[in-house]
Image (cartoon, rainbow, N blue to C red):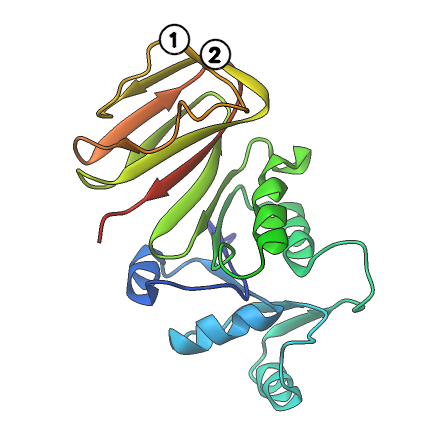
Amino acid sequence: MKRQRAVLFVNGNLVCPDRVRSMLCTDDFLVAVDGGLRHLVTLGLKPHLLIGDFDSVAPDALMHLESAGVMLKRHPVEKDETDLELALQYVVAEGYREVLIVAALGGRLDQILGNVFLLMSPSLEGCRVRLVDGHEEVFLIRACETIYGRAGDVVSLLPLQGVAEGVTTEGLQYPLRQETLHPARTRGISNVMLGERAVISLRKGLLLCVHTEVC
């Protein structure tokens, strides 16, 4: 039977491992994206799949995983896609429509931006994809999304690919009511959740939502 969600562990920063652990379900399909294997090891978990060029995985670790029955998909070091893009292509082709990407937000700025921009891939339309590190979650809003958190959490809304029109919020300290957000302005930065739930909707455009949990 198909598992409900794919969880991809990337080789970035994992700020709060315990929070990430609490997000996981027993039927998740666990994917180590090359060096992201280290986070699964930290959590005491075994991946179902290791994918990438394996330049960040020790040979003895590869042998151990293979002997443990873990599926290995190796790609050349010289390639046109990042290991994360290849992993996303694989799980989408396998039919997963909910994807959690863990530890893709820390490290080099170019890698972070590349990981975030992957969310705009046409192949991910109709999928629910979120980047998390245990402290922040990042995802796209194409029409309407609900955010679950706590009072005091910070929510920032950034328009992508042009203006976002008809932006309306519920449950935030500074409400937006059918407003237009512009890429070159900071109108949507640093709003605050009033309770455990907030709703964001828009009529036209694309929003990047950054939800930062209070400590």
Q: Residue at x 17, y 30 (%)?
A: 194
- The one nearer the camera, 129 or 177, is 177
Q: Residue at x 59, y 47 (%)?
A: 113
Q: Is residue 137 above or below residue 60?
A: above
The 10 Å Cα crowd at callout 1, few under 14, some 14 to 19, many 20 or more, is some
Furthest-bottom residue in this view = 60
User: In the drawing, does residue 195 fall left or right of residue 189?
Assistant: left
Name which residue type carries label 1: Gln
Name which residue type carries label 2: Arg
CA distance separating discs 2 and 1: 8 Å
In which quadrant will I find the C terminus? bottom left
Q: Residue at x 66, y 37 (%)?
A: 121
Q: Is residue 108 above or below residue 190?
A: below
Place of residue 23 in the rendered image (x, y in percent of width and height, measured from the top left): 33, 55
- The one nearer the camera, 40 or 49, is 40
Residue behind mark 1: 178
- The one nearer the camera, 67 or 37, is 37
User: In the drawing, does residue 90 fall left or right of residue 20?
Assistant: right
Total marks in image: 2
Place of residue 91 in the rendered image (x, y in percent of width and height, measured from the top left): 61, 52
The 10 Å Cα crowd at callout 2, few under 14, some 14 to 19, many 20 or more, is some
Question: Helix, strand or loop at disc 1?
Answer: loop
- Residue 203 image label: 2
Q: Earlier in the sequence, mark 2 or mark 1?
A: 1
Place of residue 159 in the rendered image (x, y in percent of width and height, measured from the top left): 51, 25
Instruction: Look at the image and tell me whether residue 94 can be seen.
Output: no
Furthest-front residue in this view = 185
Q: Are marks 2 and 1 in contact (CB under 8 Å)?
A: yes
Q: Is residue 165 above or below residue 23?
A: above
User: In the drawing, does residue 102 fall left or right of residue 149?
Assistant: right
Tag in front: 2 or 1: 1
